[in-house]
Amino acid sequence: MIVRNGLHRLRMTALSALLASVIVPAAQAQEPEYALRWATLMEINTLDPVYQTNFWESVSTYNVYDTLVWPDAEKGVVPWLAESWMISEDGREYAFKIRGGQKFHDGSEVTAEDVAFSMVRMLVVNGPAASNFRMIKAEGVSFEGDTVTFKLDAPNSSFLKSLLLFRIINKDVVLANLKPGAFGEMQDYGTDFLRANDAGSGPYEVADYRPGEILRVKKFADYALAPVKAGAPGSVEFQVTPEIATIVTKLRAGEIDVGDPTIPVTVQRELGSVPNLKRREEPIPSPWFVVMNTTKAPLDDVWVRKAIASAYDAETVKNHILGAGGPLAGPVPASILPGCEGITTYPYDLDKAREFLSKSKYSAADLAKSDLRIAAVAGSDRFNNISLLLATNLTRLGIPTKVQPVRWTDIVAAQTKPETAYDFVLFYEPAKIPEPTLFLNYFTKSTWGDAYPPGGMYYDNPEATKLIAAGIGSMDTKVQADSYCGAAKLIAEDSPAIFSHTDVQHVTLWDYVTGFPPSNGAMYYDLRFENWSMDAKSPQLQANQPK
Amino acid sequence: MTSEANSTDFEPEIVEVRYRTLRRFFSNPTALFGFVCLSILVFVAIFAPWISPYPEDALDALHFDRMLQPPSAEFWFGTDEAGRDILSRVMSGAALSLGMAVIVTMITVTVGVPIGLVAGYYGGRIEAVLMRIVDVFSSIPALVLALGISVLLGPSLINAIIALSLIWWRVFARLAHGQTLSLKHEKYVVAAQQLGASDRHILFREILPNMASSLLVAASLDAGAVILVGTSISFLGAGANPPTPEWGLMVATGRNYMPASWWVSLFPGLAIFFVVVSLNMIGDGLRDVLAGE
Amino acid sequence: MKLLRLVQRIMQMLVVLAGVSILVFLLTRVLPGDPVAAALGNRASAEQIEQLRNQLGLNQPLVMQYINFVTGMFRGEFGLSLVERRDVGAVIAARLPATLELIIASLLFAIAVGVPLGVIAAVHRDRFLDGFSRIFALAGVSFPQFWVGIVIQLFFGLTLALLPITGRLSVAAPPNVTGFLTIDSLLALDFTAFGNSLQHLVAPTIVLAAGPLATIMRMVRANMIDELEKPYPELARALGVHPFIINYKFVLRNAFTSTLTIIGFLVPIMIGSSFVVEKVFGWPGMARFGADSIIANDFNGVIGVTMIVCLFVVLTNFIVEILYPVIDPRVRLEAGT
């Protein structure tokens, strides 16, 4: 490790590189490094960890910036940039001791001051990333020496795991690059600079960024927080490629090394027959829901909602439309809330559905008059086919329903009011951290009217809400698990949404790439490229690498 | 159809000219080929519900048990991602694409031509105002404006038709304007003016019939362009919605399954190609025939 | 007289630009749809949304918003893009050269191939070559471009492995001077980058040029036939001038003027097509940003891109009008009388 780093430094100047190659044959011993190339379906519009919203923006920032904690299958999180932490008796104060000797990409050291600055900036700028930190205000952030302290508004047991979503930026670099803006003496708080520039301490640093075309990050030579795997890519390239068909072509041609998870599973299965391509199939705890607007007739009747859930053919959705899918009982995926047995499920059964309907306060004639709408994101054939399947079954059941393709921006805006919120919205929720409240909160008043599909459910069960609050307020993992499980059961019984299934991620990649180490339930952590490797001995790798 | 001023006496000769034109049209191989292709397509469009093998697949039928099957004796064009028969959908889609082209062309000719006529005939301030409005609409590419309007109205086939109609009138307004400018000094127009004919008579009885042939050529060529722009709107996600068997949408959906399941996008793509080529061939042939007179 | 006409034309251009600005402004503000909530990612709070609405000036009266928009435009500012999170003016400045490079390359290609094909078709009128080129032309304008693009990628990029599949450049970029990679790489004498950027241009250029090429070809053919039927080629032939010279010198020059006029007609179509082509080829141009803006209801982006596109269309027509008499002596004579 140290030797490799030393050689890296040698390479920094052309002269020493020349000397090394002439005098020391060891230069040959240094393994050549390769570029790992991805095609991203979505644009990489910003590198600012506070503003990034889509999957690919996040993947890039998680490699450029580091976090205080790292996900762990058993403990939830383990120390990372934070060496250790203390939690106050009342569960409101978290004090993190920052690990010494860690460097930002400009060579300066990561300090508690940087961490405090990063948190305050996130909260004040109030970009998308701040949505995960509603439990703390900027005034609650302080630092002293090598310790930073976060004082929460109320005890919150999800805070530690939320820190997996909090990335540390370099205060000095930001302050040196302020532009006029709306944040008083902080001017624009560096948003213009950070959109296109690097102020991180992660294992990769930004080498080349051309918006709309390419982002290239290269290995950070002084990364000392964790060992970098032998054969880890020397650089990672994200090539913006907004067409799925084009991504497939590029993958087959060897212009990229890894495909996109959004390529339809049926297409990826076909790709499996191409020599030297392999397909990775990994169940992930991200659920698919069909949320219902529980304020609208007849969806305000629990029996109607149960009948609707029973008319949803999850098996066809999984096996045919999407090509894959895991089980889901209730609002929280089992891997995030393990050991919670006895949650009511609604297997596809139209007879059962009719039985539920007969218990509802609505007569068959009432139901026949309803004209329900399923909002499906416009332009996605998969969303449309799933919605169509549900609409067909509901209409057959005597509840006339139609599919309405809507732009995402319009769905989100409509959900903010009960009168405009759609009857049904099909949506997919990426499980960013293994935290049950991430999903349970959607079924409480606190998220009513949020600009997001579940914000349009307007559902609340006081008993479940009480249980969720008890879990959040307790530091005891047993109490947490029991309360969340109890809440999940109550919610499933009320059926305010169809809990369809969990995702199975498919990725097709060239066989010389070894990647996707365990993410321990936290998204993006399996896409930290210092833990990936590329097999230098593979002739395909040699052939595919750009000349 | 023809003006009253030169009617009756010359009737036989006009019939003779028409007949000759028609014969020349059909002896022009391009035009004939286009006409035959289009006739077949129109026939299919009208009778699709009765002659297509799986008429229910044109709508919202779902057969996930037979999805993405390659062309076979059972499904000549294969099946799509929801197991629907592509042949049936292509046949049903003919009515939509042709319908869209016809509706948009009819609306825009009806709106655009009078605007161009009035602007060209009266000149002056009326012309300046009308033609500046035409300029405004002409300076934004059709696809850009149609896409924008279609998205703002909410993605659907009807809205795509509205969007296309809102922008395409400018083509015919401009054409009619140019033609009027050159026709209004023709002897028979001046004669009619001196005989005290009303402006309305002159515009619609003297000038309009004489630009009919240019309009016909432009309309047939533009109908093809309308279909292609409509297709591109679907490709960008702002046109017809699934499961509508609209060709552009079918190509757009099918592209995600290329190249392994090439048939999903190839056949609707070929259908688009055939209808646009037919319209272009007719337009091209018409131009040759009419120019020859 | 001539100067007056010029001033008149410029006034007309300004009127058209003002008209477009009002049209697009109204379209984006008055029709339903609120993009702000979605721009903040998942689970935006009402407070976050309000903060952004204020930042965008959406809480001001419509007239004020329009005035702000127009005054901003003169400073080169088009307002914050919800998609790219920076001023739309900056986005366009960064992305416009890529679009222009592609459109100019396509136009040059269309002219370079379309004009000779048109001449050949006219000279061989109603024979095999004419028929062939006619079918070629009709096919060129009758295919959905995105579909052709994907097929070209499969064939040239994958099967033959001749061309890169997407992007503008896959080697180190030359220093940015004009933003046109082909020109910048030549200025830097970086022939690797020049060759590489040319390679990347080929496939999108072919797709984008197919339609205009066909149109130019048909136009040249039609005008050539008109010209060939006039007396002077006959006269030249009688005088023993080589037919090659007759075709290319006498006739083509006249036919070329008509090609020039349809460039004004082709440019808006090509800009429109580039909305599709840039998406298929991952071309980092302004048109793709425009398409994304429209789909995401990024109103400042929509207005900014539309205004710039409109400006280019209007300017092209203006330049064509100025060039016309320069190239065609007859027009000059007419103008003089």
Image: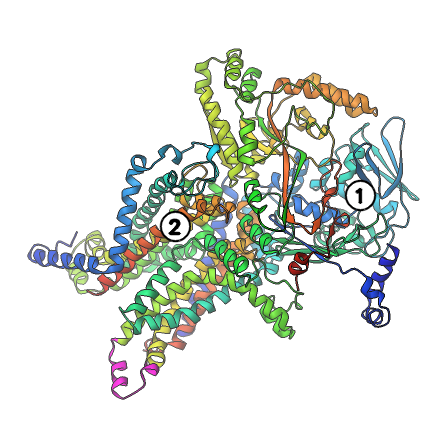
Q: Name the residue under label 2.
A: B270
On screen, residue C171 above or below A373: below
Mark 2 nearby-residue class (10 Å; few <14, some 14–19, many ≥20):
some
Decide whether residue A472 is among the magenta residues: no
Q: What residue type is labelled 2?
A: Leu
Picture coordinates of residue A431, whole percent (x, y): 69, 35
Answer yes or no: is residue B16 visible: yes
Q: What stretch is highlighted in magenta?
A: C229-246
Q: In this view, does A63 lie to the left or right of B184?
A: right
Residue toward you, A36 or A378: A36
Q: Tell me the chain of label 1.
A: A
Quadrant of residue A535 within the rendered picture: bottom right
Picture coordinates of residue A61, whole percent (x, y): 73, 48
On screen, residue A101 above or below A287: below
At 61% across and 66% down in the image, what residue appears?
C179
Picture coordinates of residue B32, whole percent (x, y): 24, 56
Residue with the most extreme right position: A145
On screen, residue A150 above or below A304: below
At 55% across and 50% down in the image, what residue appears?
A243
In what quadrant of the picture does the C terminus of chain C appear? Answer: bottom left
Residues indicated by labels 1 and 2 sit on the same polypeptide chain: no
Query: For the stretch drawn in magenta, what is the main secondary structure?
Result: helix
Q: Name the residue under label 1.
A: A67
Q: Is residue A80 left or right of residue A291?
A: right
Q: Whole-Å distance between the Cαs marked 1 and 2?
A: 53 Å
